[in-house]
Image: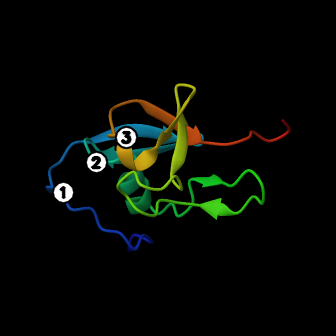
């Protein structure tokens, strides 16, 4: 089955892939790639929902100028496009949690 993503990573074919957890799901992403690019290449379109309307948001500028790709890592809100994939990285959508 062809990858559902519109994005194809530009990496070496033998680049090591590492385990990353996002929103409770495990992914094997190329080490050193930005988290936003890795999740896009894995088929994710939305990384969070806006706090006011609940509209889905995903990576937009891919260079840290906007804030559409916000995720939470170790209790800190970060831009996924500015975070490098590393083994054991655990991230979740930024914003208010359900029921809060």
Residue at 30% x, 68% y is: 8
> Mark 3 highlights which residue?
83
Q: Position of residue 31 (x, y in %)?
A: 26, 41
Contact, CB < 8 Å: mark 2 with mark 3?
no
Q: Secondary structure at mark 2?
A: loop
In x, y percent, where is residue 41? 38, 61
Residue depicted at 69% across the width and 55% down the height: 50
Q: Please rate how many residues cluster around mark 2, counting C-alpha atoms within 10 Å: few if below 14, some from 14 to 19, many from 20.
A: many
Cβ atoms at labels 1 and 3 below 8 Å apart: no
In the image, taking residue 58 as reference, residue 87 lies left or right, namely left
Q: Are marks 2 and 1 in contact (CB under 8 Å)?
A: yes
Q: Residue at x 52, y 25 (%)?
A: 74
Q: Residue at x 14, y 55 (%)?
A: 12
Nearest to the observer: residue 9 or residue 84: 84
- Which circle marks residue 33 in the picture? 2
- Can you say whether 4 is above or below 85 in the image? below
Decide which of tag 1 and tag 3 comes sooner along the chain. 1
The Cα–Cα distance between marks 2 and 1, rounded to whole angstroms, is: 8 Å
Q: Position of residue 77 (x, y in %)?
A: 54, 35
Q: Of label 2 and label 1, which has the lower sequence position?
A: 1
Estimate the x, y position of residue 1 in percent, counting from the top left: 40, 73
**Residue count near mark 1 (Cα–Cα under 10 Å), binned few <14, some 14–19, many ≥20:** few
Q: Earlier in the sequence, mark 2 or mark 3?
A: 2
Residue, disc 1: 11
Q: Which mark is residue 39?
A: none
């Amino acid at each position: 089955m062809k990858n559902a993503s519109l994005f194809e990573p530009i990496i070496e074919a033998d680049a090591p892939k590492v385990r990353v957890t996002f929103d409770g799901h495990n992914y094997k992403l190329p080490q050193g790639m930005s988290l936003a690019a890795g999740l896009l290449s894995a088929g994710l379109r939305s990384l969070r929902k806006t706090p006011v309307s609940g509209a889905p948001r995903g990576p937009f500028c891919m260079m840290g100028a906007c804030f559409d790709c916000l995720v939470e890592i170790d209790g800190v809100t970060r831009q996924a496009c500015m975070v490098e994939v590393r083994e054991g990285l655990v991230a979740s959508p930024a914003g208010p949690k359900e029921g809060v």
